[in-house]
Amino acid sequence: MMYKKIFLQLIIILCMHVFLCFYVSAEETSEILLEDNFESYGVEGSGVDEDRKAINPVKAENDGSCWFNLEASSKRGTIIRSETTGNHYLSLWRQTKPEVILTSIAKAVGQEHIVAKNKEYTFAVRLNLPKHESSLASEGCSYKLALSEAADASNALPLVVINSDKDTATISLGGTDTGKRLLPERWYELKVVIALVNGKAYLSTYIDSEPCVEYREMSLSENELEVVRKYLTVEANLQEMPDERSKETIRIDDINFKVDEIAAPPLVATFSPATGSMVTDSSAPVSVDFGSEIENVTEQHVTISNAGKIESVKMNETCTGFEVRFAGLKEGTLYNVGFSVARPGENMQDFTYIFTYTGNRERYVFDWFDSYGIDGSGLDENGKGINPISATESYGIWYDKEAASKRGAVILQNEYKIPELVFCLQSQNKVIRTQMSSLLKSDASALGVPNGVYELNAGFMIPYGSDAVGLRGDCYAKVGLGNESTVNNLFCIDYADGKNRISFLGSEKTADLNENRAYYVKIIIYPENGKYTADAFVANEFNETVQVLNREPVQINELAQMKRLMIDVNGYDSEKFAKLFILKGIDFQCCFTPKLLWCDASGKTLTMDNNTIIAEFDTPAPEELNCYSIDNGAQVVKAERLNENKIKLTIEGLKNSERYVLSFPGVKNDDGYSCLNSVMFEVENKIEVTDITLGNSMLVSGENKFSVKLKNTTDEQLTAVLVLLVCYGKDSEYEIEQIVTRKKESVSGDDSIHASFELETAENRFIKAFLLDNITDMRPIYGEIRY
């Protein structure tokens, strides 16, 4: 009985041991397939041999555990080196004796034991590009780390590809360009992750933990990956190096390749426009894409805050995403949009999209210096003024590397405790000139669009007194738009003839300014057929306003490529602190004008009897006749609204073969800006007027003969009527003495119409002639003729 009890206890212990072993192996799902931190080579891991020489870790034989390559093992193109910290790494060299310009080494990848539906392969490595003299040592070189089917790197899946130029190197990870560039003498941590989920492969790549791509679907199957993941290969091509001297070209460390069992990875949403955007068009959709197939999304899966409404949800053709349209948006309101999305057969995942509906405006820069310091006071904890300029450039901050470390621009409170930006001369830090800029919105797509009017508003003062020297002599203050190569000055304040003055957009027109007086400027820039006109206003603290520019043509270069709003204040070398210029605030924005969405006459040739035109806008269309304008003597005589945004216009006075421009100055938005679009059309040329003559070329006493040569350009039977008015007097005051009409019932391909009349005297007489298509409708064939 006792033996049975002992036996039973042994059985229980054995079963527990088996269970625990199974439990541990089930939990331990990560498996290292290849690892090398280069700390195990040489005498006691020193990386050097018994003679203190650096070790080449590459062997000629493949024993499954070492790096190998028959040629590389006999040369010094690959050696172990050590940093001052004691860390060892693999160094690839360009050698002259023996010559090494191509290096290819490989190491076998271990066998995988994980069997799972979903798993993830992770390759990680650290790389460093050394500098040699004034450029990268690897200039002209290329490198590739890959998973390969064979040690000769055939049938390879690229993991890391680097191409070096003189100063930086491009890098792609997992066969996808990262868009980033590597700098010299810096260790980068690179990671390539391939997730196999439900038979599909997804790529994620990272540089220093920052994602480059996340879960992008790949055209790679598990079987294809199984074929290529037999070796890790490292290749270096140094043939294009301009410098043939021996030197270290790249450092490689901490190689790791592992596989993990995973659940399905999370979906990653890509939004267009990006989350956080300022949205100006309420009818424009938001596009969402996940890069892989998702289940159908409907209005029930989408929510929006602040009383907004979901108008529609439409899946894209590949079922990887959808677009959402909204309704009921209110200008200036921030909206949170929620989405619930899932892959086929998986659980729902929640996403949030944020946007602000700005309506007719897109703000690029807005700073009136009331957001700095404690409670917007512009002062720090010690009551000192704040320098708002940063050494790091990003949207929403002022930037200048030099000005960031000096006190040439400081926010100070004025006498009313309102913060302002004061530009100063400094003696200690030697500040003579301060330049600062603010990046415009990264998605400032409205710059350069035909329906965008651009506004700049700014407040300033030129101080002069005990601690202020103002902008005298050669001092100036400029505000402009710029990029890397171009600057367009918006306004400039300088000094001439004993006074400060302001000019705008390169115009020679100026306005005088007084010191110690607050001013506010507004510049409005209008696009007109690829060119620009501008209004410019200056108002002082007494609300006295001067308009300096009135729709004056101005030259603005590359507006669509402008990246920054720039401020430049220049002083002189001073031995003491002094104020130069005070900026009270500044903002730059685009105000969208009403847009013509469609017009049935645009670019068309109309018939003479078709005198109605339909136009549709993105804003309500007024019915007042003076809201619409047409040239060449024609008139809009009726405006009938078909729906809120669509109008039907009736036009009289259209002439045969004439070209017309129809514009919409009275179609305005809430900001008061008119529609800038116009429509050009022609009237068909059925009857050509080839010649007009008056006998003797002038009026004479006695008989006068008037002739018009006509040409019917169609196969239709057309009528022409000539109406002559014989007038006595002057242009402003005259009497009609005679009316002569002649009708041509059927105008042929080469025809004419004649009229004659008698004058007792030609003194103070003149004639007006009109050529009409018929006497009933009286549509002009030709413009007014006068002799």
Image (cartoon, helix red, strand yellow):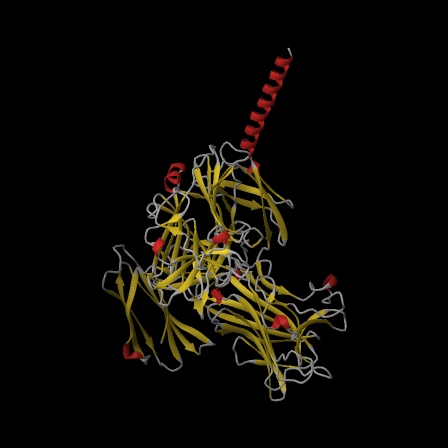
In this picture, residue 374 sits left or right of residue 550: right
Instruction: Tell me: residue 784, above or below residue 425.
Output: above
Looking at the image, which is closer to me, 238 or 74?
74
Instruction: Classify the position of the N terminus by image quarter.
Output: top right
Going by the picture, which residue comes out furthest to the left?
Answer: 750
Furthest toward the front, the residue is 50
Residue at image position (29%, 64%) is 688
Q: How many circles with numbers are drawn on the protein?
A: 0
787 or 606: nearer the eye?
606
Q: Is residue 155 above or below residue 780?
A: above
**141, above or below 313, in the image:** below
One can see residue 785 in this view = yes
Q: Locate the C terminus and report the quarter of the image it occupies.
A: bottom left
Measuring from the top left, give residue 534's x and y in whole percent: 53, 71
Question: Measured from the top left, where is residue 362 in percent x and y?
Answer: 57, 59
Q: In the image, residue 174 lies at what x, y percent? A: 43, 48
Q: Is 331 placed above or below 387 here?
A: above
Residue 785 in the figure: left or right of residue 549? left
- For image coordinates 47% across by 60% down, the residue present is 182
Nearest the eye: 606 or 576: 576
- Residue 429 location in percent, x, y? 65, 78
Q: Which image quarter: residue 779?
A: bottom left
The quadrant holding residue 418 is bottom right
Q: Residue furthest bottom?
A: 497
The answer to whether one can see residue 125 in this image is no
